[in-house]
Image: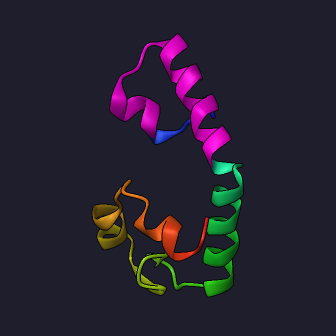
Amino acid sequence: MKGTPFKLKQKLKPAAAKRKAKADQDAAMSEWGKFKKRTAQKANCPKGYDFDHASGKCIPVNTNRKNNSRSGVTKRKYNY
């Protein structure tokens, strides 16, 4: 939690930052979050690349972060 770039970027109040950190951690440790982490680690992408769950390939970090959506399409693809 300490030193995360998100706190600085979003300029949250301390109480809000703490709530957000907990919400982010809860999301990351959910069944779906753990599944994404497992599959991304199996892909073993080179430095500067992220595993894109929608396409199933390693793509540049910036491209992956731009393309992320919250529509749930990828979740449905993996039956989660």
> Where is residue 27 drawn, in percent x and y?
61, 44
> Where is residue 52 drawn, in percent x and y?
45, 76
| The quadrant where residue 3 appears | top right
| The quadrant where residue 7 appears | top left
> Where is residue 74 drawn, in percent x and y?
46, 69
Query: Is 71 situated above or below 78?
Result: above
Relative side of 5 to 35, left or right: left
| The quadrant where residue 42 appears | bottom right
Residue 70 vs residue 24, the one in the foreground = 70
> Where is residue 22 drawn, in percent x and y?
64, 30
Residue 46 in view of the camera: yes
Residue 49 vs residue 80, the one in the foreground = 80
Relative side of 38 to 14, left or right: right
Question: Quadrant location of the N terminus?
Answer: top right
- Magenta stretch: residue 13 in it? yes
**Residue that appears at 70% across and 72% down:** 38
- Magenta stretch: residue 40 in it? no
User: Secondary structure of the magenta portion, mostly?
Assistant: helix
Question: Quadrant location of the C terminus?
Answer: bottom right
Query: Is 57 situated above or below 54?
Result: below
Residue 2 in view of the camera: no
**Residue that appears at 36% across and 70% down:** 64
**Residue that appears at 35% across and 30% down:** 10
- Count of numbered labels shown in the rendering: 0
> Which residues fall within the magenta stretch?
6-27
Query: Is 11 situated above or below 9?
Result: above
Q: How is the image coloured?
A: rainbow
Residue 64 vs residue 55, the one in the foreground = 55
